[in-house]
Image: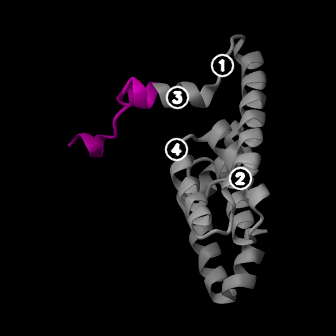
Amino acid sequence: MLRQTLQSMFGPQLTKWFVAITVTQYHFMFYLSRPLPNIMALPLDLRGHDIDTLVTVLIALHSWLKQQHSYFIFSSAAAIIIFRAELALFLGLILILELVQSRLHPVRFIKLAVPAGLLFLALTVAVDSVFWDKLLWPEGEVLFFNTVLNKSHQWGVSLLCSL
């Protein structure tokens, strides 16, 4: 889907390079071979984290390139709220660009973003609370742990970063 959009907008040469670079990334092929819960977000994220996030971001980027703002906002909300909160930085910049360039009216944005946010927050809390047997928003807990409590170092430190 994204490949076709890129080809129609930028031509076959850019599309070939995009596909070649994407599929030669180690993490991309590694996560494709793993049945992880993150697989659902693949279309949403092109930054190469987990496959599920990647799927969700791919859908968002496709929708943005096609100027389908409702799909862009809903897929971005799913990617950010369910899978990776830091995607708000990446997808938020795209959204700000759309607002600044008047391709998306602020009122329409609010009418789309509020229901999308509430829907995906309710969905992830409902599903994950059942699995964890307590009221829980996993991505919110991770965001709080890493940013507010500043304890991200407890996940571990790369040897190269500690030298």
Residue that carries the numbered disc 4 in the rendered image: 86
**Which of disc 4 and disc 1 is earlier in sequence?**
4
Residue that carries the numbered disc 3 in the rendered image: 142
Residue that carries the numbered disc 2 in the rendered image: 107
What's the residue type where badge 2 is placed?
A: Val
**Which of disc 3 and disc 4 is earlier in sequence?**
4
How many labels sit on residues? Answer: 4
Residue 94, horizontal then vertical, whole percent: 58, 61
Residue that carries the numbered disc 1 in the rendered image: 136
In the depicted structure, whether residue 81 falls above or below residue 96: above
Asked if residue 149 is among those painted magenta in the image, a careful observer would answer yes
Pointer 4 and pointer 3: residues touching (CB < 8 Å)? Answer: no
- Density class for disc 3 (Cα within 10 Å; few <14, some 14-19, many ≥20) is some
Q: Residue at x 76, y 28 (%)?
A: 122
Q: Residue at x 78, y 64 (%)?
A: 68
Q: CA distance from mark 4 to mark 3?
A: 11 Å
Pointer 3 and pointer 2: residues touching (CB < 8 Å)? Answer: no
**Which of disc 2 and disc 1 is earlier in sequence?**
2
